[in-house]
Image: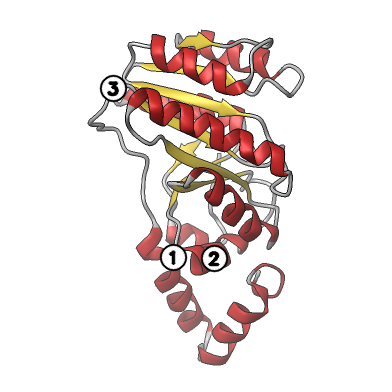
Amino acid sequence: MIEADFGPKLAEKLSRSATDYDDLCNKIRAIISPHISSIPTTFLTKPTVIMLVGVNGSGKTTTVAKLAHYLQNAGLSVSIAACDTFRAAAEEQLFVWAEKLKCKFYSGKSMNPASVAYTACTQTNDDVLLVDTAGRLQNNTNLMAELSKIRSVITKITKCDPISYITIDATSGQNIVQQIEIFNNACKLSGIILNKTDCGTKCGCVVRAIDTLNLPIVAVGNGENVQALQKFDIDRFLKYELIQN
């Protein structure tokens, strides 16, 4: 985990200062613990908009369903906006989840993503609006500008900045630091949701990301189960048991 995911600077810092395994764990705990947060369930504005952003395949659409279930269990009403108008079947996949969860659904394949966001923001009467966005590589300037436009539309309509969570594939390695930096420039990230932690990875990449960027990790998820969204557990992380079904 240290050699593959921490990067040379952090790996050297920890290996030079740690006296034994327990001391190493304590140092990792000191890096992460101040940045463990959770998804809020009390909001001052209605609707509160939560955007899900991230690269292709990082689990955004499934995370929308998990978030909807989580917020409904907290007694909140939830709408979903399908602002991924690019990926084939993205709208259909999200629509199936919305039907299962009985969430109002906004979409429009012929519309640009910002227009879908506009429609959803102006029409919803629910407590929370979840906005799914298209996966994109962080080096695609045009698509990153599209995210900024979606965020700008939401802010203009609701008079409040959206909460923006980036979904991270736990198997991505050190590349996630660059991902987070560039997505943060585009839409001012509020936190990290770490996905696919059931794939055998030790998820060391998140230590370097937090140490470098000071962004909170708000949840951990894996699989298709809508209940598979948990708070990050530092003790299980240090034992390589981050999440279990």
Residue found farthest to the right: 88
Point out residue 207 in the picture as x, y percentages from the top left corner. Answer: 54, 65
Point out the tag, 1 or 2, that comes first from the N-terminus.
1
- Residue at the image point whose x is 44% and y is 65% from the top: 32
In the image, which is nearer the foreground, mark 2 or mark 3?
3
Q: Residues within 10 Å of mark 1 (few under 14, many from 20)?
A: many
Kindly check if marks 1 and 2 are in contact, taking CB atoms under 8 A apart as contact. yes
Q: CA distance from mark 2 to mark 3?
A: 34 Å
Residue 78 lies left or right of residue 141; in this view the side is left
Q: Which sits earlier in the primary sequence, circle 2 or circle 3? A: 3
Name the residue beneath numbered marker 2: 207
Horizontal and vertical percent for residue 204?
A: 61, 64
Q: Nearer the viewer, residue 126 or 16?
A: 126
Q: Amino acid at mark 3?
A: Lys
Q: Of the numbered discs in the image, which one, if any, rests on residue 32?
A: 1
- Say which quadrant the N terminus sits in: bottom right
Q: Which residue is mark 3?
A: 46
Label 2 neighbourhood size at 10 Å, few (<14), some (14-19), many (20+)? many
Real-space Cα separation, disc 1 to disc 3, in angstroms? 32 Å
| Whether residue 84 can be seen here | yes
